Image: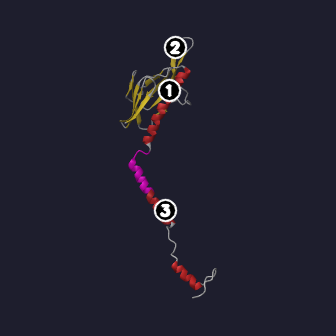
Amino acid sequence: MPPLVIGVVNPVQSNKLQALVPKESGFTLFELLIVIVILGIVAAFALLATGDFGRSRRIEASVSQFVQLVQMAEQQAIIESNVLAIALTPHGYQFYRYQTTINNNQGQWQTLPPNSLLAYHSWPAGVKASVSSSNSSLDNDDGTKSFIIISPTGDLTPFFLYLKLHSKAIFYLKGLTNGTIEVKKL
């Protein structure tokens, strides 16, 4: 047997060593790309099977936004010592302020500025509102408005609001006189 010398490799021994060491194994770039494409196709079919593409989250966010804006309007009515109103239509809602004139103590409803947080807001696409309150109800598309009054004490007109998606009720909101709003997902 030849003597072992560190750092020097005999070419004959080198071939024997390569035969003992296994070849490198792994995936090629092409194989990895094929797997990624297949996973993408499977994910696309899974997304199509679920069907709503985030619509339910947008509706939940819109309901939460409505509740928070009503609470903000209640606080604004208290701070300004003024009467506010929410005009609800099947497709959205708008906040109003009751302005009185100094001379004749008569007033009129004025919309809040469009750059205000209390400007017009629409419901997400496909969602329609159905409202019932003590002063009116709204179930149709004729453009009529139902008003919820917010007093300077923060109290509001009791109301029932159903949000419907394709004629199926999906949310129920109940406004109480003390200004709280109960939300129930149907």
Label 1 Cα neighbours within 10 Å, binned few <14 / some 14-19 / many ≥20: many
Give the quarter of the figure containing the C terminus.
top left
Instruction: Check residue 43 for magenta coloring.
Output: yes
Q: Which mark is residue 95?
A: 1
> Which residue was labeled with disc 2?
106
36 or 182, which is in the foreground?
A: 182
Residue type highlighted by circle 3 = Leu
Find residue 129 and report its horizontal and vertical position in percent: 40, 31
Q: How many marks?
A: 3
**Which segment is the magenta one?**
40-53
Instruction: Check residue 20 for magenta coloring.
Output: no
Q: Earlier in the sequence, mark 3 or mark 2?
A: 3
Give the quarter of the figure containing the N terminus.
bottom right
Q: Which mark is residue 65?
A: none
Q: Which mark is residue 33?
A: 3
Find residue 97 and report its horizontal and vertical position in percent: 52, 22
Q: Residue at x 52, y 25 (%)?
A: 75
Residue type highlighted by circle 1 = Phe
